[in-house]
Structure formats: C-alpha cells, structure tokens
Image: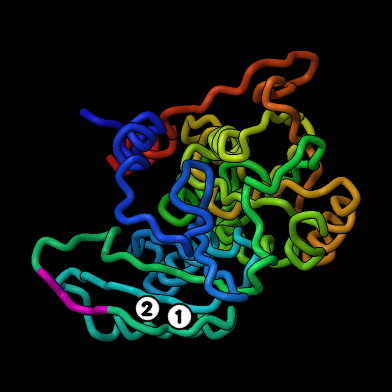
Amino acid sequence: MANLGKITDDFFQRVIKPQLGAKRPEVAVGPEQGVDVGIIELGEHALAMTADPVFIVPEYGFERSAWFAIHILASDAVTSGLAPAFLSIDLNLPPGLADADLEAMWGVIHRECERMGAAIVTGHTGRYDNCQYPMVGGATFMAMGPRDAYCSPRFCKPGDRIIITKGPAVEATGIFAAMFPDRIERRFGPGVRKQAEDVFFKMSVVEDARLCASIGTRDGGVAAMHDATEYGIWGGLHEFAKAAGLGLVVHCDEIVWTPGVKEVCEEFGIEPFSSISEGTLIAAVRPHAAAEALRRLADAGIAASICGEMTEAAAGIRVVEGARERELQHPGVDPFWAAFYNALR
C-alpha cells in the first residue's frame, strides 16, 4: 500500500515532471518539489499560482474550518512574495451539508479573501454522492505583482540567512487541539490545552510572508520562501535546498517553538520536526536584511529566529543538534497521519 500524503520525490521526478503538457514561454517557474507556486510572466506583471484541495473538517466548526481552508490555499501563493489577487474555487460537497453551514463557510471565505485583497473570480459549487469530508473540492489561489518582484529558490545564494517562523508541528498541534482538547487537558491541564487551542489560528503564513517580502525581494531582501506543510521543517528544508540547487546548515537549538507544541507532540507520539506544519514559514534572506525581517515579524507578534544559512551545494544539507552535526535526510513519511488516525480510533 502506498504511503498517505504527497507523492515521493522519486515519483514526481520520474512521472510528473517530464510530462507537463505544452511548453509556454510565459512559464517562469514550473512545478518543482520545494516550490509552492508556479510563476507566469505576462508583460510587466508576474502571476503566482497554486492549487490545493479545499479541506473542510466539520468537527472544527464550519466557520473555523473555512478559515483554515482558505489560509491553506493563500499561504502557498504568498510565498512568491507577491500580493494575494484572485481565487478560483471548486466545491464538490457532501449531500448532507446544510445550506446554513454552506452559508457560514462561504461567508468566511469571502471575508478572508476581502481582507487579503483577493477577488473570487470563478468556480463551481454543488452537492454530489460519494463526496466526503475533508477533501470537498479544489482551488487555485493567485498572487500578482511586478515581474521583477517575485521570489523563488532559484534566487538563493550561499550565505543567505535562514529564518523560520513559529517552529515545528504547528499544524499538527492545531489539529490535535481542535479534535482532542479534553485528552490534552487530562494529560497537561487547562493551561496547555488553551495554548494548544490557540495554535489553530497560527496555521497560516499569509502575514509571515507579507512581512518578509515587505523588506524587498531578491537582492533587496528575501530570496525565497517555503511553507512547511507535509514532512514539516525537516522536509521543508530538504525540499528548499534541493529546489535552490544549494546546501544549507540549520541549528536545531536555535529554532523557535510555539507554546503547547512540545506537550501535544509528546502526548500523540510524533516527532515534531518531521510533522505537518502549515503556518511555519522558511525564508532565505540576504544577510543585510535578515535582522530587519526578524524585527518586523517580532513587531507583529510572530515568533521567528535566524537559525541557519544557505551554503554551496557541495557542503550538503546539514543539521546541527547540540554538539552533533549530521546530514539531513528527507523524512519520507509524515508521522502526523498515522498518529491522527490512531487517535481517532
């Protein structure tokens, strides 16, 4: 049986990447592991595009679930460094979804798009047999800006500082806290339960990416950004370096943690740095701009640290943990999924 979650890099390189339809000169950045968006250059403008499932979990509550769904979609697009602009969304809904719940979901999607400055331009909405939560459709979110303003791993250089926001297992913690709050409270008390529940609305990098890009892109500041979703920080760093064609070194002890995460990972038996972490931004920033990026994040209340740097490819992808340095391997399997379904059972 194949592993749950995203396909392996081997399958992507062997099957997907060689078969990408027609070649178009407007495509500046195409599909690649570790790159969250495709980029199309149109005249003086660049359009960043990303596609993801629409992920709705009724147990979160329909309004909270819709917030998470739209921020998953937007978070990849804004790693381009461009501003949110357009949404195309397809909703293939379970027959039992009530109109009132659909209205609640759509109201949140509209509100969050409006706040980001993104227009909903097209879509499809209907109820169908055999459509089940949590995957109830798909969407393409787009960001737009000047042609010379987007960032991408190809702009990374050795010496770029690595900034990581919020730390490991943000999404894993937010989901476990939404689904199993009483279990967390029984183990650690109401204080940790509250900390873990507060993580839910940190599962977005929309503001993180906006603040990093506000210092400038490419040689002006941020070279590339990546949303650490499946496979967490370790997977995200590995994909990031591969996409850039460079090495990197990261100091594990210097990565920030969000309160409540360590306890939740302990309770559900998952390794934090390999676990799904929507809301954790990995950014490569020019040395002269890294401190200013960190200051702007801190002023907005977003925990972050400068915890590594890009290196020449020959140096490899390395992690320093205490006095030990090792090669960083891609996790291959995200431990969240098995732990989550075990908890449900």
Residue at label 2? 105
Residue at label 1? 108
Callout 1: helix, strand or loop? Answer: helix
Residue 51 percent location from the top left of the image: 39, 61
**Residue 192 visible:** yes
Mark 1, Cα crowd under 10 Å, few <14 / some 14-19 / many 20+, is many
Q: Quadrant of residue 302?
A: bottom right
Q: Residue at x 65, y 62 (%)?
A: 150
Q: From which residue to which does the magenta span run?
A: 124-128
CA distance for labels 1 and 2:
5 Å
Residue nearest the viewer, comparing 62 with 107: 107
Residue 90, placed above or below residue 187: below
Q: Residue at x 78, y 37 (%)?
A: 307
Residue 170 percent location from the top left of the image: 57, 48
Mark 2, Cα crowd under 10 Å, few <14 / some 14-19 / many 20+, is many
Q: How is the image coloured?
A: rainbow
Callout 2: helix, strand or loop? Answer: helix
Q: Residue at x 49, y 32 (%)?
A: 270
> Is 219 situated left or right of 16 in this image?
right
Residue 61 percent location from the top left of the image: 39, 69
Residue 78 percent location from the top left of the image: 59, 64
Residue 125 is one of the magenta-drawn residues: yes
> Is 234 situated left or right of 53 in this image?
right
> Is 45 situated left or right of 268 in this image?
right
Q: Are marks 1 and 2 in contact (CB under 8 Å)?
A: yes
Residue 254, placed above or below residue 113: above
Q: Residue at x 55, y 41 (%)?
A: 264
Q: Amino acid at mark 2?
A: Met
Q: Can you name the residue that lies furthest to the left here? A: 129
Task: Please name the predominant secondary structure of the magenta segment in the image.
Answer: strand
Residue nearest the viewer, comparing 228 with 303: 228
Give the quarter of the figure containing the C terminus.
top left
